[in-house]
Amino acid sequence: MGSQINYTVTGIDAGAGIMSSTQKALKAYGLESDNWQLQTSSTAAMTSTLDKAIQDKRPIVITGWQPHWMFTKYPIKFLKDPKNVFGKAEHIDTVVRKGLKTDKPEAYTVLDRFHWTPAQMSEVMLKVNDGVDPEKAAKQWIKKNPKQVQSWTKGVKKVHGQSLKLTYVAWDSEIASTNVIAQVLRNQGYKVTIQAMEIQPVWASVATGAADAQVSAWLPKTSGLFYKDYKGKFEDLGPNLKGAKVGLAVPKYMTNINSIEDLKN
Ligand SMILES: C[SH](C)CC(=O)O
């Protein structure tokens, strides 16, 4: 099968943890020796390549993750990973800079309580994918889910214009979560700026205090290296989402490819 797709896995931005996990998988499953390679691109480029392949019913292997609208929009499936290179389930943690609890206790409490489900994240992701501006999609979700937002803000004093900076990676999942929590914090009175960058600078920005928080930490495996590299220089407030998953994925019409092992000639 490999020859039909030039032995290529279509990936996303080079720094993403899913990319290093995929490199590890190519090695672990002996695909590297079969000249398999991992193509770096971006989430947008990967999903557009996936779209074209599915329109032409061509084989393709991508780096996939859930929650993500690609599993709603396209008939794709994760490949089994018997060597457990990608791990079973992932959770996405909220990571804040040291000292935030003292300097901005109200923001700290809301960030600590922020928690939602893959279905709720997907709701916002799909709206953005349909062309709704991310900030607007966040406002619509907040309006529709007052009880859940109150569980994050109940009893938290409002502030008056204090600044707050969140950094994130422009993955569809993190565009959704960062815009939702940013809007909730704006409604609490903060002047919130959000800045998109690659995942390594996101971790560095919080570790150096250049940013106050990030909600993009896919753990335990995908962002595990960054967690280790910056250990002690941030505070992990735990999961804002549980039940995520990363791996390699293919269209369901590739009926004979169900495990990463099946990619081997
Ligand atoms: C968009 S991927 C699941 C996340 C990552 O690679 O850190």
Image (cartoon, rainbow, N blue to C red):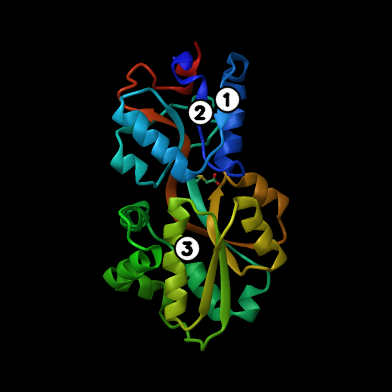
Residue sitting farthest toward the top: 265
Which mark is nearer the camera, 1 or 3?
1
| Rendered position, 31 above or below 38 | above
The quarter of the picture where residue 130 lies is bottom left
Q: Residue 256 at what x, y percent from top left?
A: 36, 16
Q: Is residue 91 visible?
A: yes
In the rendered structure, which disc, 3 or 2, sits on the residue that comes first in sequence? 2
Does the CB distance between marks 1 and 2 fall below 8 Å?
yes
| Disc 1 residue: CB within 8 Å of ligand 1 | no
How far is disc 1 from disc 3 in space, using C-alphas? 32 Å
Q: Which residue is mark 3?
A: 178
How many numbered badges does the structure rendering display?
Answer: 3
Q: Residue 11 at what x, y percent from top left?
A: 51, 36
Does the CB distance between marks 3 and 2 fall below 8 Å?
no
| Rendered position, 140 above or below 249 | below
In the image, what residue occupies the spot 47% across and 70% down?
182
Q: Which mark is residue 37?
A: 1
In the image, what residue occupies the spot 44% across and 60% down?
177
Q: Which mark is residue 9?
A: 2
